Amino acid sequence: MNAVPRTRSLTALLLAVLVLVLTTAFAPGASAQTSVSTIARALRTGPVYVDPAASAQLSRADADALADRIKKANKPLFIAVLPAGYPTAHLFADLRAATGITGLYGIRLGDRFDARADASVMTPTARQNLVNSVQGENAKAQLGDFTDRALANLGGHAPSSWHAADGSGGSGAGLIAVGAVLVAGGAGAYALVRRNRRRREEEQRAALERLRVVVDEDITAFGEELDRLDFQPGEPGADDAMRADYAHALDAYETAKQRMAEAARPEDVRPVTQALEDGRFSLATLAARRAGRPLPERRPPCFFDPRHGPSVTDATWTPPGGAPREVPVCAADAARLADGLDPAIRQVDTEQGRRPYWDAGPAYGPWAGGYFGGGILPGLLVGTLLGSMMATPSYAADYGAGYGDFSGFGGDYQGGDVSGTDFDPGDFGGGFGD
């Protein structure tokens, strides 16, 4: 008598389970979460990825139009549109590592948006200002505005894998047509590339020659300091520490001369001025030992003219039209500032006449970076012509990366380069309020 009810109950239970499984399987957004590796593979073949679970945010036509704009601009901009519930922990860093391409990455996640970039293509400040400027818009407007503003300020070039992907799925006739166009335009394109390369090389040589005059003056001044030094390694009272300081200063002088003779680009000047700064500190240490004074603290050279030697204190200084800042100064310039007088500023020749080195052009970035490394240079040069130039994404491509920590984070890769996991994780930390 009780068998039938039990059978019906079992049947009903099985039907309920089947309905639950089918409902879960075909519910919108209930499919398995797309992996970061899958997103990365898509971005290596094209600049825009829209997750199937987020297709309602951006249509296929709008995504294709956005991708075309990015490709035509030839910039390393990557955009991903993901569902609202996608995990955000380490999302930017993991995506950057999986994609392996230096660039700017923007992610629309539900109705939220954020972006991260390698500092070699866009500074953190520029990236944050860009993200803030597009908040609160719908997906199409937001991603369109973000793309337009990013392309106007983004350094580097598009990855070659995008162009390879464009031709991989075409028909035979399409490939023939593309080949014909490439053959017809190849000679002209090659000539244009060579002409641009020659022009850039000529500009670099001219910048190096202007810079060489200043660096040779620095080397000569240091050599004269060594000539005036009344120290003999065998004199009475000389000990091994003094002899080591003296030998180090001589080695620094020879190193500076050799590195300058071998310099082929403006960025090759940085190790020259690094050697001079190191040699002058050795002389200051030697002087303290001989006089019986405490050894000097390792400080940067005098900001106004590194030939003055290591600084002894910091002083407040305001450049014309700029904001006050603390700069390292030698004793003589500290006294001048305290008396209300102008410091003895290093002047160099420019097309507009003699100017302070920080207003003389971008080639002086490597020169200053060798003297003032370790991250202090941005604060010293903010608001100056040189400081403004060094803060732009394009500066590293022309004058080298890493001068005073303005740029060049994560190696020397430019936008679009395949750098794998060789990037600064700090550039891709956080995101979406994490």
Image (cartoon, rainbow, N blue to C red):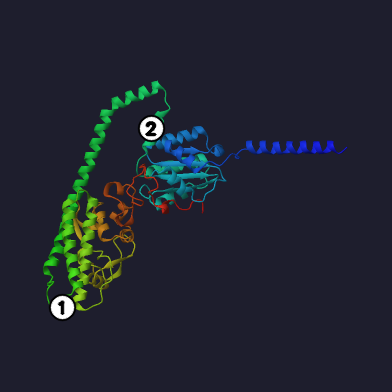
* Residue lying at 22% horizontally and 43% vertically, measured from the top left: 201
Query: How far from the left and from the top, in percent, is residue 139?
Result: 52, 41
Residue at label 2? 164
Helix, strand or loop at disc 2? helix
Front position in the image: 416 or 349? 416
Mark 1 residue crowding within 10 angstroms, few (<14) / some (14–19) / many (20+)? few
Query: Could you tell me residue 65's position as x and y percent?
Result: 46, 34
The answer to which image quadrant residue 334 occupies is bottom left
At 27% from the left edge and 65% from the top edge, which residue is drawn? 300
Q: Secondary structure at mark 1?
A: loop
Report whether residue 345 is seen: no
Where residue 183 appears, as percent x and y from the top left, is 29, 25
- Quarter of the image with the N terminus is top right
> Foreground residue, 363 or 29?
29
Q: Amino acid at mark 1?
A: Gly
On residue 32, which mark appears?
A: none
